Image: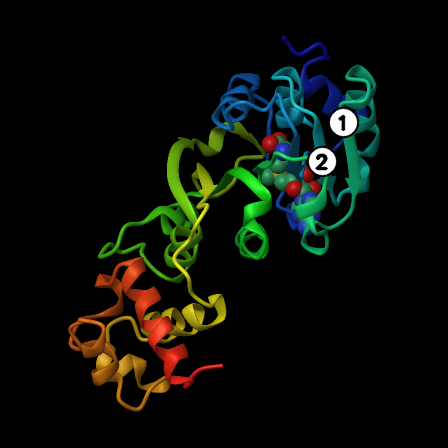
Amino acid sequence: MNDILPPLRDVIARHGLMADKSLGQHFLLDLNLTERIARAAGDVSKGTTIEVGPGPGGLTRALLAAGAQVTAIEKDKRCREILAEIAAAYPGRLDIIEGDALAIDASSIGASPRRIVANLPYNVGTELLLRWFAYVNAFESLTLMFQSEVAQRITAPADTGAYGRLSIISQWLCETELLFHINPRAFTPPPQVQSTVVRLVPRANPLPARRETLERVTAAAFGQRRKMLRQSLKVLAMDAEGLCRANGIDPTARGETLSVEQFVALANSLDAMKVVG
Ligand code: SAM
């Protein structure tokens, strides 16, 4: 179905909506790009599509045109009228929650299957993702735009510069895939950085581990990125060397060379020793 509303640029001008930097507002007005992101979310015709930060509604319109039932969470009250116009054009298909997505539990919004699709505000993107991880199995997928540096960290394989705490928690819980980049010039106003769309699909059975312990291990290993594990893990276990060896890990290796499975093994050993938590 084609979008049935006036061009976004006209809508924004008519409502006098000026982008507010403090809310991370960079609007995508190119319908080809918003359609591309909506397509990347896969089949949106069933269940609920949750969008964070619809702003003037470019991506929202693409999702609705693709057949989605959308619940959009927007903090900026100035977007209220524009979003109400979109809701009127798609009766019963768009619910708006006016509020801070950081304060909203997204796990019970609408009917399942639920998915999140969003061009996230850069300033809270990572924080939102970490919160969603607490109940990530409530979603069939998360299709999200981040600044490229964050997208690289989410999807980075071991032993690369971008690999770190965010890669491990993300890949422990989800299959992650970097989809495509979007040039700053595509946004109004253009951000300083390149943007990238990432897709995360929650794993049905992530390796058993306590998230808190896993995060402590990765914090220790990457807090002192250049140090060998026998040194960096000492904050967690006096015998860091023994801990590594018990898991078949070279104590002189650096954290960045370890796989997600190896971090999980370390976390489980620590829990078994009851040293952590
Ligand atoms: N989806 C629109 C687009 O693609 O053009 C706007 C994306 S803009 C990068 C981010 C949006 O998130 C803005 O509309 C901003 O007002 C909203 N936003 C910022 N912080 C938010 C928060 N904590 N909760 C909900 N929305 C937020």
Mark 1: few/some/many CA within 10 Å (<14, 14-19, 20+): many
Residues 10 and 269: in front is 269
Is residue 20 visible in this depiction of the protein? no
Q: Is residue 254 left or right of residue 107?
A: left
Question: Looking at the image, is mark 1 or mark 2 earlier in the sequence?
Answer: 2
Left or right of 105: which side holds 170? left
The foreground one among 108 and 41 is 108
> Could you tell me which residue is drawn at 44 percent across and 31 percent down?
182
Give the label on residue 94, or none: 1
Observer-nearest of 1 and 100: 1
User: Is disc 1 in contact with disc 2, using a CB cutoff of under 8 Å?
Assistant: yes
Q: Which residue is mark 2?
A: 72
Amino acid type assigned to the residue bearing label 2 in the image: Ala
Circle 1: element type: strand
Q: Is residue 193 above or below residue 179?
A: below
Percent from the top left, x then y, of residue 45?
62, 21
Above or below — where is 148 with respect to 93?
Answer: below
Above or below for 107 versus 190:
below
In the picture as drawn, the residue positioned furthest to the bottom comes out as 238
Number of numbered callouts drawn: 2
Residue 102: image x %, image y %?
Answer: 67, 54
Three-letter code, disc 1: Leu
**Residue 206 circle label:** none
Secondary structure under badge 2?
A: strand
Which of the four quarters of the rendered structure image does ligand 1 lie in? top right
